Structure formats: structure tokens, C-alpha cells
């Protein structure tokens, strides 16, 4: 049961990769490009009804399934993690509730609701759950995972800086993927630590 988030992460990665193979084309750099560009396309491009090049996007159902699995995986992680370590009851509830809310809101990226609004709301609740996770790691004296988590915070900050300043926006798809990968590896490492515990 503790390893469930690891299996969920693996399923998400497989679905993500399959979706990239089905994406027709178009990116922020070249709307007429063919296929998914790891350097120029965003994860959200896979979730759109139509690709940037205007064609129907057959990657969407696979990407939606991947997003659903990811949201369930992270909700499960934030439900399980506080129960597995010594924390104040209120903090445990804060992590569980905010983590689940973050992932529920993130699932609305599939809809026509404003993308930035969904992202910002999910980020706020995700931040609460993440801060709680940091407190749990620190109190458990898991300082290596605590430090690894700080790298994730720096990457999230870099994502926001690039997105809102627009100056280096051409690099954002790559930064986004590195941030995604680093965060998921961090979650998996925490789960492995819980499993060994």
C-alpha cells in the first residue's frame, strides 16, 4: 500500500509518453511542426481538444487518463504520508485536506475553466501540503529528503519566474519537464523511505 504512489507515478509516465507519440504537432516555437517536441511543447498541450497546428488531438484521452492517475497518486500520497509519521493531528489533517484539494482542482485542467486560475488554486493548496510534508520530513530527521525537496521549491520558483516575466519563456517547456520529473522522483523517494521504515 505504501508503494502505491510509486506504481501510480510509473503508470503516469507511461501514459505521458504514449500521449506524446499521438500528439499531431505544433508548439510555441513553430505552430506547423510535426509531433510532440520535448523542448517546445508543454504537458498541457497534450490535454487540448485540438493540437496547436489545428488538427484534432488524439493524445487527449491518453493525457487525461495520465492526469487522472497522477491526481489520484498524489492525493493518495498526501493522505498516506501524514499517517505514517509523527505529526500533530491538525497538521496531518491540513496536509491530507490541502493535498487532496490541490489534486482535485488540478483535474479541472481538462475543462474550459481558466487555465491560470486552476493552476494557481491547485498551487496554493499544493503549497500547503508541501510545507506540511517538509515539516514532517524535518521532524522525522529525514534531512536528505528535506534538502531534495528544497530543490523542488527552487524549480517551482524558477517556473513561476519564467512564466510571469516571459523573458525566457522559450525555455519553460524544458524547465517544466525537469520540475515534474524532480518532484515525482522526490515523492517516490519519500515512499521508498516509508516502505523501508
Image (tube, helix red, strand yellow):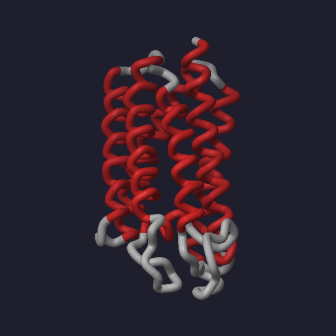
> Relative to 57, is 77 above or below?
above
The C terminus appears in which quarter of the rendering?
Answer: top right
Q: Residue at x 42, y 71 (%)?
A: 48
Q: Is residue 134 left or right of residue 103?
A: right
Residue 115 % position (x, y): 38, 69
Q: Is residue 136 left or right of residue 69?
A: right
Residue 142 % position (x, y): 63, 23
The furthest residue to the top:
197
**Number of residue marks:** 0
Q: Residue at x 46, y 51 (%)?
A: 66
> Relative to 158, is 36 above or below?
below
Q: Quadrant of residue 99?
A: top left
Q: Quadrant of residue 174?
A: bottom right
Q: Is residue 146 left or right of residue 44?
A: right
> Relative to 121, is 53 above or below?
below
Residue 119 % position (x, y): 41, 62
Q: Which residue is drawn at 52% across and 51% down?
A: 15
Q: Residue at x 55, y 19 (%)?
A: 194
> Relative to 159, is 114 above or below?
below
Amino acid at each position: 500500500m505504501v508503494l502505491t504512489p510509486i506504481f501510480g507515478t510509473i503508470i503516469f509516465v507511461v501514459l505521458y509518453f504514449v500521449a506524446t507519440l499521438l500528439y499531431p504537432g505544433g508548439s510555441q516555437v513553430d505552430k506547423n511542426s510535426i509531433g510532440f517536441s520535448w523542448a517546445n511543447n508543454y504537458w498541457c498541450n497534450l490535454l487540448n481538444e485540438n493540437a496547436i497546428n489545428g488538427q484534432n488531438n488524439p493524445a487527449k484521452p491518453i493525457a487525461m487518463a495520465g492526469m487522472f492517475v497522477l491526481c489520484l497518486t498524489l492525493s493518495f500520497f498526501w493522505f498516506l504520508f501524514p499517517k505514517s509519521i509523527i505529526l500533530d493531528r491538525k497538521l496531518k489533517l491540513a496536509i491530507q485536506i490541502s493535498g487532496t484539494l490541490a489534486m482535485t482542482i488540478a483535474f479541472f485542467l481538462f475543462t474550459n475553466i481558466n487555465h491560470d486560475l486552476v493552476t494557481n488554486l491547485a498551487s496554493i493548496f499544493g503549497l500547503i501540503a508541501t510545507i506540511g510534508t517538509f515539516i514532517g520530513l524535518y521532524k522525522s530527521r529525514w534531512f536528505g529528503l528535506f534538502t531534495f525537496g528544497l530543490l523542488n521549491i527552487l524549480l517551482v520558483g524558477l517556473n513561476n519566474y519564467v512564466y510571469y516575466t516571459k523573458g525566457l519563456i522559450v525555455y519553460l517547456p524544458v524547465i517544466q519537464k525537469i520540475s515534474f520529473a524532480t518532484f515525482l522522483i522526490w515523492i517516490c523517494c519519500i515512499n521508498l523511505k516509508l516502505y523501508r521504515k
